[in-house]
Amino acid sequence: MSQPPPQEGFGAPYEPRPGVYGDPGQPQPGPYGQPPQPAYGSPPQPPTVPYGRPQPQPQPPNRPSGGRSRGRVVGLVAAVLAGVLVIGAGVWLGVRGDDGSDDKKPVAKESTAPKQPGAESNRKKTPAAEAAEINKGRKEGEAKVRWIQKNGVDLPGRGASALGPWVTGGIVAKAMYRTVSGYSLEDGSQKWSLPLPADVCAAPTQPTVDGKLVIGLMSATSKEEAACEKLQMIDLATGEAGWSKTFPQAPTQDGLRNIVMAISGDVLTIGRIGRSDAYRVSDGKHLWGKVAGPCYSYAMTGGAAMFAAVACGKQPIDEADSEVRRIDPVTGKTVWTYKPKEGWMVGQFYSVDPLVLLLQNVRDPKDDMEIVVLNTDGTFRSQLVVDEEKLGVQCTLTQRNLGANFDTCIGLAADADTLYLASRYTVEDGSWASEVLAFDMSTGKEKWKVRAPTEQTLTPLRVEGGRALIYLSPPRSKAKGVGGGIVALGPQGGALEPVLRHPASAAATERTLVGSLVLYADGRSLLMRPHVSGDTDEEEMEMRTMIAFGD
């Protein structure tokens, strides 16, 4: 089964199609780089953006990931369940009523003209001039740089991480520090900016199909007392703030800041130790607050269907019984349950449709991790035969210092028959080089491998039209005449097929967007830097944060 190409425009949603359970299955919008999720059981979707798990404390931005994942996986699972991951602090200045709603809403500032945010500096070129110079040097067959964005925000301390990007209509939006901003996909101009009264601390990986998003905000005035417990709904098309609420903390984790958020249809779920809650995105109505049984969900993922990673019974975490459940997002009821082997827990939802799980053994370090594929009814389908030392999958928590969602890894794409996985191998000088491995989804066995050009990296994004779309980075060195871009591989492998060639003249700028989140649709690509930090305020203000390619 193959996935149809996106409809008109960036990130445009597909038409709804019946799901395998008889329900219509709301399509889910993805970043342009991930088309919307069709109904569960329909042609599959890969995971979302550099979308593995990190250490309990956030890793320094730009640290490479891949290879052995035990520390990252167990670390984050333990952090989620123990509530020890500190992801930021901020001040909430709004007034909250008795019902948890707020009298005051943030107000988006309309941009009166296309402009780059931030003050002038001694950087030689503006982003517009830089884009123009790159385009002058492009060769025949290379796409142009549509626009470049710089940071333009004075950030605290060691900088800040960005959540997103989210695409709706002609807008690409991101949240960073105390602002959510929307930019034109056409020319990069800022269309709206929504100031927030506190630090953003969590957000779903995907918005609703009509571009609504609910973000988490810090709530206290002191860092010691701050908790991620404030909800703010935002219309990403206009930047208008909707309803706002404070959600209840788990009784045993009053200081919990590590929040997992997911959207499926019109339902937002929030997971943290000891408690799960669901709200209707459109109006903020609370729908349910507990999963079935003596259990708690420590991770959920949205999209075409909602899945929960659940721990039941015993404490601490390494003695709990683990389950994976498909959840009805409206009622919270369990549709089906899959039970991993004793001692194994979910470390990451690599893909939703088909459902691919990274499982972690939390009891026996000798038996470290597994990648498991499930059928649409929750039964076991296959287990990948893969060398965990060579895994090239990357997750955003290796580049960000906030957010804890379990569906944010890239480097893996799948359809009903083939799974494409980023991997690496050792070259003569002892360094790592990049390759893509293909696996049979029914047997879990490797089918073939394709290696990247010298000093370049291959990162699978998704499967579309029977081909895996893959981001090819520019060379690590300053090799002349070689750029990055989007390439494709079919289910039989073979040579890399160019889809969108980024200009070689843009390679230096493209390399500065370290750990980029890469989005692609309709012949255009967009790269977003997940963390912004500089040695000086001036450097930080001028840092390039997004670049868009395509004709």
Image (cartoon, rainbow, N blue to C red):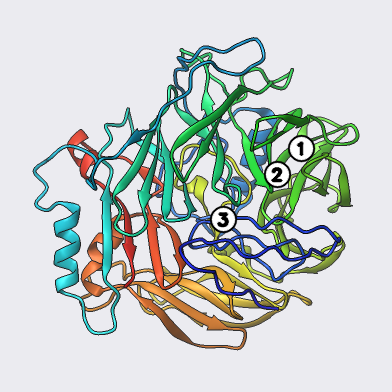
Q: Position of residue 434 (x, y in %)?
A: 46, 72
Question: x, y percentage for residue 394?
Answer: 52, 57
Q: Is residue 151 left or right of residue 312?
A: left
Return the residue nearer the eye: 418 or 219: 219
Q: Nearer the viewer, residue 482 or 70?
A: 482
384 shown above or below 67: below
Mark 2 vs 3, N-terminal side? 2
Q: CA distance from mark 2 to mark 1?
A: 7 Å
Work out which quarter of the rendered image holds the N terminus and state it: bottom right
Q: Which residue is mark 1?
A: 297
Report whether residue 231 is seen. Answer: no
Mark 3: few/some/many CA within 10 Å (<14, 14-19, 20+): many
**What quarter of the picture does the C terminus occupy?**
bottom left
Task: State the mark number for residue 77.
Answer: none
* Left or right of residue 393: residue 528: left
Please give the residue where the numbered disc 3 appears in the rendered image: 409
Contact flag, marks 2 and 3 (Cβ < 8 Å): no
Q: Determine contact: label 2, label 1, CB under 8 Å.
A: yes
Q: Earlier in the sequence, mark 3 or mark 1?
A: 1
Q: Residue at x 78, y 29 (%)?
A: 289
Occupied quadrant, residue 112: top left
Relative height, residue 274 to residue 369 (above, below)? above
Q: Secondary structure at mark 3?
A: strand
Res. 300 mark: 2
At x 78%, y 76%, the residue is 442
